[in-house]
Image (cartoon, rainbow, N blue to C red):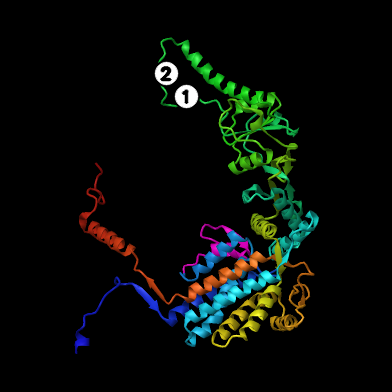
């Protein structure tokens, strides 16, 4: 009786949606699996592309996992975690964004039947973390170092890493051409961590093979005034002056007030304005610079003045381009033309203006510090060039990582199969439930070679059986064997130069395991009622009040306006 009389306790606001328990966890797993299925077909050299168009009508064609995940407007709170890990993989390593989403989805898929059978999520999480640690240790053990090699050998090794990344992209058909270009660009900037030191410029038209690398800086011709065509367009070893000031004739501001007692004094004020600009231009010429670049406008007077003195000038240069010129030519950007000394001027081997497609480019090459490079991309459609830029960004990131960490592992699903075999073997030594959980983790890793086969149209079961047999050889000679995309069988990935930096795999397995553990540890979702509902009611009341005659006076139909 006492239990019946107990008052009901209301903790949460009315309308709050709560769901908890096993059903909630399974629902989260299903959402993540659905997201993984969306990018599943983009994996590998035979992966398909996705065409996404947003509400503004912008069309994107891509098979880059991170790009697709960003553009999919995912609202499910648990599935958003997969978007975050794809972004973190992209910013940290550059490649492996589809891999990380697939692995996380597969870990959860393997956990689902165990959860439904009543396994406590914490037991699963503990085993998954152990398996992750063992997998990463095994990768480090299998990794091959490229340290101590000569520059030429290193270049060819890095080009193979870049080619592996590019093989799954839209520009995979020209991967050797672009891989060597990317390696040259990365080696040019050396140990500089700033990615913006490699510029990528897009020029529609021509074909992919018309793309070229400039060991220096290239940017599109800026807006120019009359007199520009009279300026010389090529210099050898010119001095370069970089400015952040306007070289224009400026009239006084509207609020300036000058009181004159004599009208003849007006001319002296006008002359003063002209003298100021001429003084600035004169100082630029006296500095000995042959190329003058400014982030702000260089007016028609200044353009003609420089043209008469055989000096090239360009105004409104993009800030990042100006910084790259400063880094390459060794100059310093000036905010004043007073006291310009030789130390602040930059220099380069050759400066020229060249026609590229329909655009004209200002190209600085043979720079002394040589800390910058520019890739000029050509291609048919705009979407194609955009995707090529994303692909090259991934390749650049991979080459930088490989240079820094200098260890590589076999690609093509070889490393995944080897870790899977190792974990299955390790699981047999464990007495207890975690043997099952580590086995399911090992099975999940096989998703990479399986998906590579599915995307290429091969019989995945057949290829995986061959791989399992090869990796199970006691001598360990089968460790580098992965899927052979060309023949539909298996092949030695190392011998076929299908390599990837070990940091890509380590990061992917770490991030995917963390994401899976995070989703498995959530057992309740609380969704608060919309805060807008209160505002909505207020707005509705206001509208109702207006309808009852509480609206604006004197604006009825047929009434005269005052």
In-front residue for pair 370/165: 370
For residue 286, which quarter of the picture? top right
- Residue pointed to by mark 1: 252
For residue 475, which quarter of the picture? bottom right
In-front residue for pair 509/97: 509
Crowding at label 2, few (<14), some or many (≥20) Cα neighbours within 10 Å?
few
In-front residue for pair 60/163: 163
Left or right placement of residue 21 versus residue 392 in this view: left
Q: Which element carries disc 1, helix, strand or loop?
A: loop
Query: Where 29 falls versus 75 (above or below)?
Result: below
Residue 211 colored in magenta in the image:
no
Q: Please state the horizontal and vertical placement of residue 28, each as a whole percent of the image.
A: 48, 76
Q: Please state the horizontal and vertical placement of residue 497, each as a whole percent of the image.
A: 77, 66
Q: Please state the horizontal and vertical placement of residue 24, each as a whole percent of the image.
A: 43, 79
Please name the residue shown 30% across and 60% down the image. Answer: 535
The tag earlier along the polypeptide, 1 or 2, is 1
Q: Could you tell me if the residues under marks 1 and 2 are in contact, i.e. CB atoms within 8 Å?
A: yes
Span of residues in magenta: 50-75
Query: Where 142 falls versus 192 (above or below)?
Result: below
Residue 212 visible in image: yes
- Residue pointed to by mark 2: 258
User: Which numbered dot is residue 401?
Assistant: none
């Amino acid at each position: 009786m006492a239990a019946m009389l107990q008052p009901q306790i209301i903790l949460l606001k009315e309308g709050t949606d709560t769901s908890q328990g096993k059903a909630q966890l399974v629902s989260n797993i299903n959402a993540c699996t659905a997201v993984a299925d969306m990018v599943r077909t983009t994996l590998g050299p035979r992966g398909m592309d996705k065409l996404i168009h947003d509400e503004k009508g912008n069309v994107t064609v891509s098979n880059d996992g991170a790009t697709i995940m960003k553009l999919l407007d995912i609202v499910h709170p648990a599935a958003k975690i997969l978007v975050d890990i794809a972004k973190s993989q992209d910013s940290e390593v550059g490649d492996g964004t589809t891999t990380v989403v697939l692995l996380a989805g597969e870990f959860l898929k393997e956990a689902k039947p165990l959860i439904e059978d009543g396994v406590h999520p914490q037991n699963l999480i503990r085993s998954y973390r152990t398996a992750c640690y063992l997998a990463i240790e095994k990768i480090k053990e299998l990794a091959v170092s490229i340290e101590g090699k000569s520059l030429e050998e290193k270049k060819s090794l890095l080009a193979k890493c870049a080619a592996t990344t590019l093989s799954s992209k839209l520009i995979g058909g020209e991967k050797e051409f672009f891989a060597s270009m990317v390696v040259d660009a990365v080696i040019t900037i050396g140990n500089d961590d700033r990615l913006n030191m490699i510029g990528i410029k897009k020029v529609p038209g021509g074909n992919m093979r018309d793309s070229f690398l400039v060991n220096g800086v290239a940017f599109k011709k800026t807006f120019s005034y009359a007199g520009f065509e009279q300026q010389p367009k090529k210099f050898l070893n010119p001095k370069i002056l970089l400015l952040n000031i306007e070289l224009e004739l400026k009239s006084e501001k509207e609020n300036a007030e000058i009181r004159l007692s004599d009208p003849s004094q007006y001319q002296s004020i006008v002359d003063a304005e002209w003298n100021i600009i001429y003084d600035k231009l004169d100082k630029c010429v006296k500095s000995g610079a042959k190329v003058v670049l400014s982030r702000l406008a260089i007016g028609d007077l200044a353009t003609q003045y420089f043209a008469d003195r055989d000096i090239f000038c360009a105004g409104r240069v993009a800030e990042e381009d100006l910084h790259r010129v400063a880094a390459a030519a060794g100059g310093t950007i000036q905010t004043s033309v007073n006291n310009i000394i030789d130390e602040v001027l930059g220099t380069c081997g050759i400066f020229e203006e060249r026609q590229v497609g329909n655009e004209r480019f200002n190209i600085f090459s043979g720079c002394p510090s040589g800390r910058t490079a520019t890739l000029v991309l050509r291609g048919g459609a705009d979407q194609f060039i955009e995707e090529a830029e994303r692909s090259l960004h991934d390749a650049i990131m991979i080459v930088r990582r490989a240079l820094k960490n200098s260890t590589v592992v076999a690609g093509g699903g070889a490393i995944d199969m080897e870790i899977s075999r190792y974990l299955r073997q390790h699981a047999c030594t464990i007495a207890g439930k975690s043997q099952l959980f580590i086995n399911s983790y090992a099975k999940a890793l096989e998703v990479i070679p399986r998906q590579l086969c599915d995307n290429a149209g091969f019989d995945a079961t057949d290829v995986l059986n061959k791989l399992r047999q090869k990796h199970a050889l006691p001598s360990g000679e089968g460790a580098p064997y992965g899927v052979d995309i060309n023949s539909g069988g298996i092949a030695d990935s190392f011998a076929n130069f299908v390599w990837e930096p070990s940091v890509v795999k380590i990061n992917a397995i770490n991030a995917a395991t963390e994401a899976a553990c995070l989703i498995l540890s959530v057992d309740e979702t609380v969704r608060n009622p919309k805060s807008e509902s209160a505002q909505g009611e207020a707005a509705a009341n206001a509208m109702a009040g207006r309808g009852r005659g509480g609206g604006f006076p004197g604006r009825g139909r047929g009434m005269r306006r005052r």
